[in-house]
Amino acid sequence: MSKKVLVPLANGFEEIEFVSIVDTLRRAQIEVLIAGVSDERGASNEDSASGGSGAKSSSAGASTKDSVGKIYTGAHGIAISADATLDSLDSSALAGFDGVALAGGWQGMLNLKASQKLREILREFKSQGKLVSAICASPIVLDAAGVLEGKFACFPSCEKFAYEDASADSSLSGSAGSDSDSSAGSGKGISAGKGASDTPKTTEKPLKGAYQPKASVVREGNLITAAGPATGVLFALEIIAYLLGQAQSQSIAEQMLIPYLNHSAEILRS
């Protein structure tokens, strides 16, 4: 039986990571569903990415928040359309997935973390023993959902930014992480364009678990985490190894010339 992975998409996503996940998994014949995340932080998806430049719908009738085919804009202005909306996936549909993979990007992470639906999915998948994975800043989302534990990798400095505020899930009261959209103290200098009344109070604190600063990818049970853009393909290959076995992962790695990075990554200049 073929494997199926849910890949949520939100404005501000890190493009290299997102495409690395989707492309590499599909090379291994893993079915990938790109599910758009509605903006539950108050601003429209079109205005929340890239300084509020606005992403336009790819077709007539796809301009509403819940429409399939909606365009989402990445951190560097690259647009990708969703296959479905996350909110449209009921329990029956979610039962057909073998795991979930989150791309990073600071603003993308904040938009993912703001989705109550996604946090519920992460908890459900983790409890069912399904794959739960995240790269770059998005282990913060795992922490906010209460599923991050053990050893993990993330973009350097993101291990410091678990947030707590009044909007945290009541079911996770007292745990690290919440639904704050503030980047205060992050050093990223990204604003969500929110009013002062919408700005939550945040407290910087470490993510739960044991951060591995020298690791590119970490697998801890059914959790897989990775450091950032340069490790996107390695992250996806580890997901393949988890779902299909190391031999299939190695085969895809060889097709993509990944072994060249070990012994032939020579750049010739004249």
Image (cartoon, grey):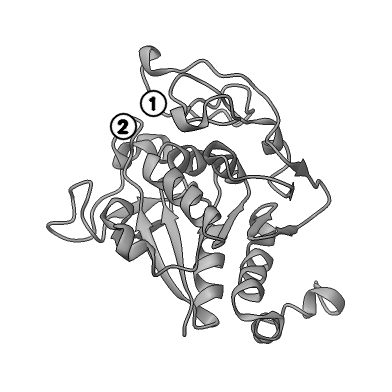
Q: Position of residue 71 (x, y in %)?
A: 31, 55
| Amino acid at dot 2 | Ala
The mark closer to the camera, 2 or 1, is 2
Q: Which is more toward the observer, 71 or 244?
A: 244
**Residue 79 spot, x, y in % from top left:** 38, 56
Q: Is residue 68 left or right of residue 105?
A: left
Q: Residues within 10 Å of mark 2 (few under 14, many from 20)?
A: some
Q: Give the percent coordinates (x, y) of residue 48.
A: 37, 37
Q: Quadrant of the C terminus?
A: bottom right
The residue tagged 2 is: 43
Q: Residue at x 66, y 52 (%)?
A: 228
Q: Nearer the viewer, residue 157 or 201?
A: 201
Mark 2 in CB contact with mark 1 (< 8 angstroms)? yes
Q: Earlier in the sequence, mark 2 or mark 1?
A: 2
**Vertically, is 126 above or below 114?**
below
Q: Marks 2 and 1, Cα distance to the nearest angstrom?
A: 8 Å
Q: Which residue is mark 1?
A: 193
Which is more toward the observer, 128 or 253?
A: 128
Tell me what residue is drawn at x 44 percent, y 63 percent: 6
In this rendering, is residue 48 above or below 270?
above
- The amino acid pointed to by label 1 is Gly
**In the picture provided, is 172 more to the left or to the right than 264?**
left
Q: For numbered disc 2, what is the local secondary structure?
A: loop
The number of numbered badges drawn on the structure is: 2
Residue that appears at 68% across and 35% down: 207
